[in-house]
Image (cartoon, grey):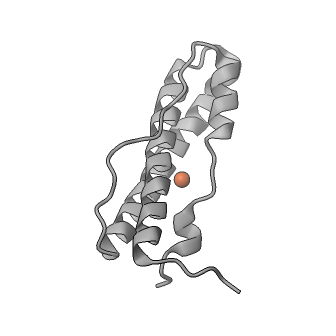
Amino acid sequence: MAEQITRKQLIDKLNDDLCREYQAIIAYVVYSQVLKGAEYMSIAKELEKHATHELQHAIKVARHIDYLGGMPNATPKPVNRSRSTKSNLATALGEEVPDVSEMAAPRR
Ligand SMILES: [Fe+2]
């Protein structure tokens, strides 16, 4: 049986998701620009694309929060930054998280 949650709990979960979307946007913007070395340039371009995808996710989540009567958060989760390409790539891969909005948003 599916767990029942209140509207407030759903808004809180979506706002938490929104903070992670902001985190991902920032991470992909930063990592795409600080990667060094010709072998990483195609990855950098991919990270730029991911930044725009995450922005679309953030807009979608914020729309759902507003639809539910909540106020979208404006604060990202912290972003790890490093001059180490390997560290940034490992973090970038770790930033991928399932979107609560994909599971909980009303279907249209
Ligand atoms: Fe996302």
Name the spot of residue 81 as percent of width and height, x first.
Answer: 53, 21
- Whether residue 12 sits left or right of residue 36 in the image: it is left
Task: Give the quadrant of residue 31.
Answer: top right
- Whether residue 13 sits left or right of residue 96 in the image: it is left
- Residue depicted at 29% across the width and 73% down the height: 69
Q: Is residue 84 above or below residue 108?
A: above
- Residue depicted at 35% across the width and 75% down the height: 68
- Residue depicted at 63% across the width and 79% down the height: 3
Name the spot of residue 45 as percent of width and height, x first.
Answer: 57, 34
Q: Is residue 9 above or below residue 15?
A: below
- Residue depicted at 47% across the width and 32% down the height: 29
Q: Quadrant of the N terminus?
A: bottom right
Name the spot of residue 20 as percent of width and height, x first.
Answer: 50, 47
Nearer the observer, 89 or 81: 81
Q: Is residue 94 above or below residue 83?
A: below
Nearer the observer, 46 or 84: 84
Q: Is residue 55 above or below residue 32?
A: below
Figure label count: 0
Name the spot of residue 18 as percent of width and height, x first.
Answer: 44, 54
